[in-house]
Image (cartoon, rainbow, N blue to C red):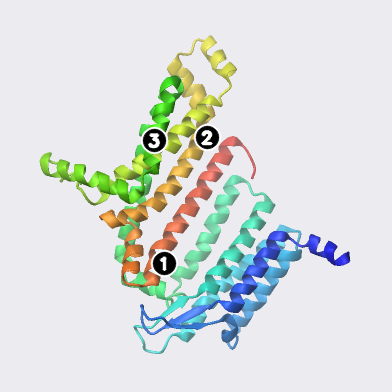
Amino acid sequence: MEEAQAVRKLDRLGLVLVVAGLAAAAWMPFIIVKANRIASGKPLLLTQLLNQPIAVALVVLLLATGFAALFARNPLPRLGVSTLCIGVLFLAIGLVSAAATPVGSASARITPGGAFWALLAVVGLVISDALVKIQLTPWMRVASLAAYSALLGIFLFSGLLDSLSIMKEFAIRADQFWGEALGHLFLAFGSVAIAIVLALPLGVFCFWVPKLRAAVLQLLSLVQTIPSLALFGLLMLPLAYISSHVPGAAELGIRGIGAAPALIALVLYSLLPIVANTVVGLEGVDPSVRDAAAGMGLTQRQVLTRIDLPLAFPVILTGIRIVLVQAIGLVTVAALIGGGGFGLFIFQGLGQTAMDLVLLGAVPTVFLAFSSAVILDAVIDSIRGERP
């Protein structure tokens, strides 16, 4: 009976995370030492690296984080220990990789193993759980994101992680990386901006004319069912025709391959969530408020701009958040038709069996999508005046 009560006192999420962390540390490699970028490599467990002080410090902090996740009811100790742990985790991967790199070898690659990524996820979830329980205000959540991003930036630009293979791939392609980053941002944010301009009036029109609402939403839903590569392919032929037959089209960047079909496809994919959320948001406005505004002499356009859209804005912004995160991910596929972006590194890495090159494209994509979601969630909650 006492044992059952003791188990109930444990934090259930903490118990799951501790078990997952222990399993990862015990059976998955912490680093993989490769002779070159495509070699299979030699896996090394964290327990095999305990001859290095930093590895011992990491194990101690992992145990402390696990203890805090299981037993600490106050989220502040959890947050402090887990933040220190994630800092030591990056410190450990950097120092261990430097120690494992053969002296004078330019081709050797040290890849973070499954244990590193699993522990990073586990400790990150402990931090997220602690931040949720602290109940930060929306802009404090953004400040927390900025603080942890700054911590990551310190490790990245300090040179401590330069022995890692992903950083070596970055060093080789630094100029190309920043160019593709700008291209990725242009396609993602540009497509969302164009979609907002098109979808907001369309959503208002669907709200004003209910008979056409079902037809418009079904048509946009049909676009969502088309796989991204198929939609890119469908757009290539007409855009290639326009490029070759319309004067000045090619000079404007309208071609069968490249950014043009990618941008159009992303805009088409972005329409449905914004249109649907615009309709839902406008329907959620209290009709009595609208009637009172009309009774005061406001025209339909004034009611829309002064009453309907401001009250519906949080719901509309939720649709924009969905679209932005979706677009950031879909841009990676655009690399297959010459659209550029981080997907270029992903598909090059897959073609060359170089997983570190894949990570060079995947990691910033995930970080960009996660950061965008956190920031827009904070904006939405701030407008609504809600706490998490």
The residue drawn where x is 57% and y is 81% is: 46
Mark 1 crowdedness (10 Å alpha carbons): few <14, some 14-19, many ≥20? some
Look at label 2 and name its amino acid: Val
- The residue labelled by disc 3 is 220
Residue 190 position by quadrant: top left
Q: Position of residue 221 (x, y in %)?
A: 41, 37
State which tag comes first along the sequence, 1 or 2: 2
Mark 3 crowdedness (10 Å alpha carbons): few <14, some 14-19, many ≥20? some
Which residue is situated farthest in the right direction here?
A: 1
Mark 2 crowdedness (10 Å alpha carbons): few <14, some 14-19, many ≥20? many
- The residue labelled by disc 1 is 359
Query: For the residues marked 1 and 2, what is the alpha-carbon distance in whole angstroms?
Result: 34 Å
In the rendered view, does 8 fall on the left or right side of 166? right
State which tag comes first along the sequence, 3 or 2: 3
Q: Quadrant of the N terminus?
A: bottom right
Query: For the residues marked 3 and 2, what is the alpha-carbon distance in whole angstroms?
Result: 19 Å
Q: Is residue 299 above or below residue 198?
A: above
State which tag comes first along the sequence, 3 or 1: 3
Q: Are marks 3 and 1 in contact (CB under 8 Å)?
A: no
Q: Is residue 216 visible?
A: yes
Q: Is residue 269 above or below residue 5?
A: above
Q: Position of residue 338 (x, y in %)?
A: 25, 55
